[in-house]
Image (cartoon, helix red, strand yellow):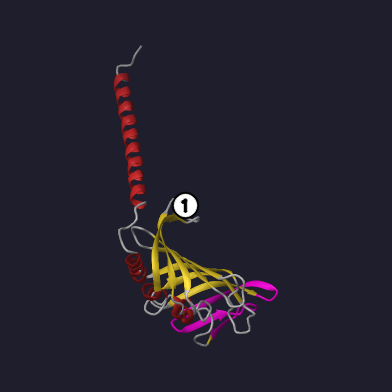
């Protein structure tokens, strides 16, 4: 025996199914449209892409960063006993930063913590962990490196040259996110001063990856020759 309300139940069930299918098709279509939008290169000169990226970075209240060194060694001291390997931390505009820095010393690999407040700079002793303030201009100070008026951001705007648009590319760490890939050269004097003489002062090859819509800078890779070394120093900065 068929229940009097069974037809109504079937009708409601069919309506729910069709509504669900329509929503699914709409969602897939929106995803496809979004993907197509993200895949478009901005109709801008490379210099304008960098200018907009710098504007976005300067306007941020702060950002996370990773600085990675590979290839030839980069020394943190004149005695060439401490080698910079990697730093990860946060910058707070306009002039504050902290980071954990991995260093290679004779017979060990260790980490130190650093804190930069403008020109003032503290770091922990690699053996005891005790904090100590160092004289200005000593050590890797990300507060100076990323200073929005004198550091990394104006360096990108003023010191890059021979910029070319390579195309769209994905980073291995962010599959599915297509970024604008640019290449060019970098004058090394400014970054030499900012990095406590670790990077530069010669001109270097540089590559950059920028989001095509938001103009957020995702990665910068700098390749610098190293006197007396068979291979270059490769600096990679991720944001």
Asked if 129 appears above or below 8 in the picture, the reply is: below
Residue 36 is one of the magenta-drawn residues = no
Q: Residue at x 39, y 67 (%)?
A: 163
Q: Position of residue 237 (x, y in %)?
A: 48, 67
Relative to 200, is 49 on the left or the right? left
Asked if 145 appears above or below 135 in the picture, the reply is: above
Give the magenta-colored segment's residue range.
105-133
Quadrant position of residue 213 = bottom left
Q: Position of residue 180 (x, y in %)?
A: 39, 59
Residue identifier under label 1 = 175
Relative to 106, is 47 on the left or the right? left
Q: Quadrant of the N terminus?
A: top left
Spot the residue most to the top.
1
Residue 106 is one of the magenta-drawn residues = yes
Q: Position of residue 199 (x, y in %)?
A: 51, 76
Quadrant position of residue 25 = top left
Relative to 165, is 205 on the left or the right? right
Q: Residue at x 34, y 60 (%)?
A: 214
The answer to whether residue 89 of the structure is visible from this angle is: yes
Q: Residue at x 53, y 77 (%)?
A: 114
Relative to 175, is 211 on the left or the right? left
The answer to whether residue 239 of the structure is visible from this angle is: no
Spot the residue most to the front.
162
Label 1 sits on a secondary structure element that is loop
Given residues 205 and 58, the one toward you in this image is 205
Asked if 211 appears above or below 117 in the picture, the reply is: above
Q: Quadrant of the C terminus?
A: bottom left
Main SS type for the magenta part? strand
């Amino acid at each position: 025996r068929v229940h009097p309300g069974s037809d109504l139940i079937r009708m409601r069930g069919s309506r729910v199914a069709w509504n669900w299918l329509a929503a699914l098709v709409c969602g897939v279509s929106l995803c496809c449209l979004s993907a197509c939008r993200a895949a478009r290169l901005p109709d801008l000169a490379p210099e304008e892409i960098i200018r907009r990226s710098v504007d976005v970075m300067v306007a941020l209240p702060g950002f996370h960063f990773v600085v990675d060194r590979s290839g030839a060694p980069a020394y943190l001291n004149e005695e060439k006993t401490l080698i910079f390997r990697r730093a990860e931390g946060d910058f707070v505009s306009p002039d504050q930063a902290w980071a954990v820095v991995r260093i290679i010393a004779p017979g060990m690999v260790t980490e130190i913590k650093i804190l930069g407040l403008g020109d003032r700079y503290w770091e922990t002793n690699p053996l005891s962990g005790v904090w100590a303030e160092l004289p200005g201009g000593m050590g890797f100070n990300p507060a100076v490196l990323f200073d929005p008026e004198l550091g990394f951001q104006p360096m990108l705007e003023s010191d890059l040259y021979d910029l070319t648009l390579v195309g769209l590319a994905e980073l291995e760490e962010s599959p599915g996110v297509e970024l604008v890939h640019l290449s060019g050269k970098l004058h090394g004097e400014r970054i030499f001063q900012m990095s406590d003489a670790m990077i530069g002062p010669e001109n270097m090859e540089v590559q950059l990856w920028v989001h095509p819509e938001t103009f957020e800078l995702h990665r910068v890779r700098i390749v610098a020759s190293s006197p007396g070394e068979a291979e270059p120093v490769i600096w990679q900065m991720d944001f």
